[in-house]
Image: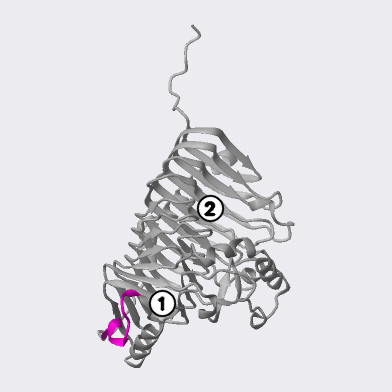
Amino acid sequence: MKRFVCLILFLITVHIKAQEQYNRDSIVASIERQILLPTIPEYTVQITDFGAKGDGVKDCKSAFDKAMKVCSKQNGGTIVVPEGIYKINGPIHFVSHVRLHLEEGATLVFGTNPKDYPMVLTSWEGTTLYNYSPMIYGYNVNNVAITGKGIIDGEGHSLWSIWKPKEAKGKQLSREMNHKELPIEDRVFGDEFYLRPQLVQFVNSKHILIEDIKVEDAPFWCVHLLKSESITLRGIRYDAHNKNNDGLDIEQSKNVLIENVTFNNADDNIAIKAGRDNDGRNTSEMPSKNIIIRNNNFKGLHAIVIGSEMSAGVENVYAYDNKAVDYVKRGIYLKTNSDRGGFIRNIYVENTQFLDAEDAIYVTSNYHGEGRGFFPSKISNIHISNVSFGEISNTAIVIEGYPKLKVEDVWLDHITIKSAKNGMTLTNTKNVQFNEVVIGEKQTVPSAVN
């Protein structure tokens, strides 16, 4: 009897401690203190002072290069782009302490000749390599910003769109180089490999702000933050409907705030990643972590995604007070396979309203059926609460682990799903707890015999 009482007291103590350990407001405030907005000197230039014309005809590439160079000599400043359409045949490469400000009515339209985009150190679906420069690119820069009500247009529907069916050779080669751990300097792609560039990418950078701009027609991923930290992404708007047009890809980055973003893109709205296979595992000291996702409007393929490139690990994600404004294929989607390794842990999704979807909550260690079992991933400590869905055309809740490494410690609390073709699939799981989970019509008093 004494042992039984002690066990009950122990379980109560553990439960209380678990509750005490999670205080969202305190945790979020702690992360926010580590996210510093960029400091930009007061020096300001107009892009038109360097020969740029917003007529949609003149190539303004040299004007942006000159403006960046002048700001660099001044130890930073703001480049103002007034109303107009600015054609740019090649990338804008950022320097530290610079803000690119697009006034309302300003549109940057990037050219589509791959030869205008030099090779830079980047990453493609989680593998580090050299490829065509993203259209806006910053490497090893600090205190940078892209702001204003203007538009960044990648013209992805043109030549870049026909590269998607041709990318298999380059994609496969990149993964072989990853698995064989070839030196990065030998991983040079570009001509005849058809790996499309990202629209906006910052690498190894710190104190980044992207605010209010509209993103359109990206060739590949829209906005990619790689191995960076202290990042604020807010008020961004999307109209991007090409293949692989992820909205925000956060990869091996930390201390990130994503808020008040209006998504309307053809792939994942927010994808949190951490490198693929050996590349990710060999940089395990750089997981993606400390990410706040709040007050966003979802519309696109999947809303909140972790993976599938997550081999360095993803932890400490706090998503709350978001909503879907239209259909999404999957609402909450955690995906990996048994060759990724790494971990997904300490994920909190709260107070979020979705509409109709194909699957509501999908957690899988068997993404695309890939993997030979050499590096299973550990998925644990997943909390989903106060989340609602409309009609689900496939399955309401899927949680599937790996036989040798189960999905563990999942809490589903106050989940309501209007209807679903299939209710729930749980395989290879441990300690999945439910409270007030309703799929279909909520049942109350049982019917009488007659």
Q: Would residue 221 be found to the left or right of residue 171 on screen? A: left
Task: Identify which residue, 311 or 226, lies in the foreground.
Answer: 226
Where is 279 relative to 97, above or below? above
- Numbered disc in front, either 2 or 1: 1
Q: Earlier in the sequence, mark 2 or mark 1?
A: 1
Whole-Å distance between the Cαs marked 2 and 1?
46 Å
Quick one: label 1, few (<14), some, or many (20+) residues within 10 Å?
A: many
Q: Which residue is mark 2?
A: 381
Query: x, y (%) of residue 256?
Result: 42, 66
Residue 77 visible to the viewer: yes
Queried whether the magenta region covers residue 102, the answer comes back as no
Q: Amino acid at mark 1?
A: Ile
Identify the residue at the far bottom of this view: 73
Total marks drawn? 2
Where is 322 relative to 181, above or below? above
Identify the residue at the far front of this view: 57
Q: Which residue is mark 1?
A: 88
Q: Amino acid at mark 2?
A: Asn
Q: Would residue 442 be found to the left or right of residue 162 on screen? A: left
Query: x, y (%) of residue 13?
Result: 48, 48
Task: Identify which residue, 252 or 242, lies in the foreground.
Answer: 242
Would you identify the image quadrant in which residue 379 lies?
Answer: bottom right
Queried whether the magenta region covers residue 54, the answer comes back as yes
The quarter of the image holding the N terminus is top right
Quick one: label 2, few (<14), some, or many (20+) residues within 10 Å?
A: some
The span picked out in magenta is 44-56
Where is 355 relative to 282, above or below? above
Query: x, y (%) of residue 383?
Result: 48, 49
Where is 360 relative to 216, above or below? above
